[in-house]
Amino acid sequence: MSLILTEAELIELTGYKIATMQINELRRQGFYRARMGRRGVVLERGHYDAIVAGQDAAPVAKKINLPSLRLA
């Protein structure tokens, strides 16, 4: 078993052969770490396993607390 999903696994997971369509579908399914590589889509198996198990969630964007900042 490799560290990244194979092309066949990505096609089975997304239903698409075109890389941009695969990325869009993976992001829709919650795989926020899916990236474009030199040879197509790269999705780490560890991230896939965590998302499927419901353990990994997208990072929450930090909010800036403007009232606490002092103006110079």
Image (tube, rainbow, N blue to C red):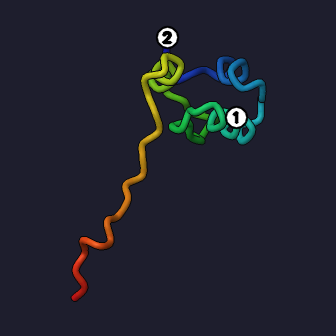
Answer above or below: position of 65 versus 33. Answer: below
* Tag shown at residue 13: none
Instruction: Measuring from the top left, give residue 29's x and y in whole percent.
Output: 63, 31
Residue that badge 1 annotates: 25
Amino acid marked by disc 2? Met
Could you say where residue 62 lies in the image, as x and y percent from the top left? 37, 55
Asked if residue 26 lies left or right of residue 68, the reply is right
Which residue of the protein is positioned furthest toward the front in this rendering? 67
71 on left or right of 24: left
- Side of 30 relative to 49 (left or right): right
Inter-mark Cα distance, 1 to 2: 23 Å
Q: Kindly indicate the quadrant of the structure image that contains residue 55.
A: top left
User: Which image quadrant is residue 68 in?
Assistant: bottom left
Q: Visible in this render: residue 32? A: yes
The residue under label 2 is 1
Q: Which residue is drawn at 25% across and 75% down?
A: 69
Task: Categorize mark 1 by other alpha carbons within 10 Å: few (<14), some (14-19), many (20+).
Answer: some
- The amino acid type, in three-letter code, at marker 1 is Glu
Residue 3 visible in the current orientation: no
Which of the pair 53/10 is nearer the observer?
53
- The C terminus lies in which quarter of the figure? bottom left
- Closer to the camera, 39 or 62? 62
Q: Which of 32 and 6 is in front in this view?
A: 32
Sequence-wise, the earlier of marks 1 and 2 is 2
Image height check: is 46 above or below 58? above
Quadrant in which residue 14 is drawn: top right
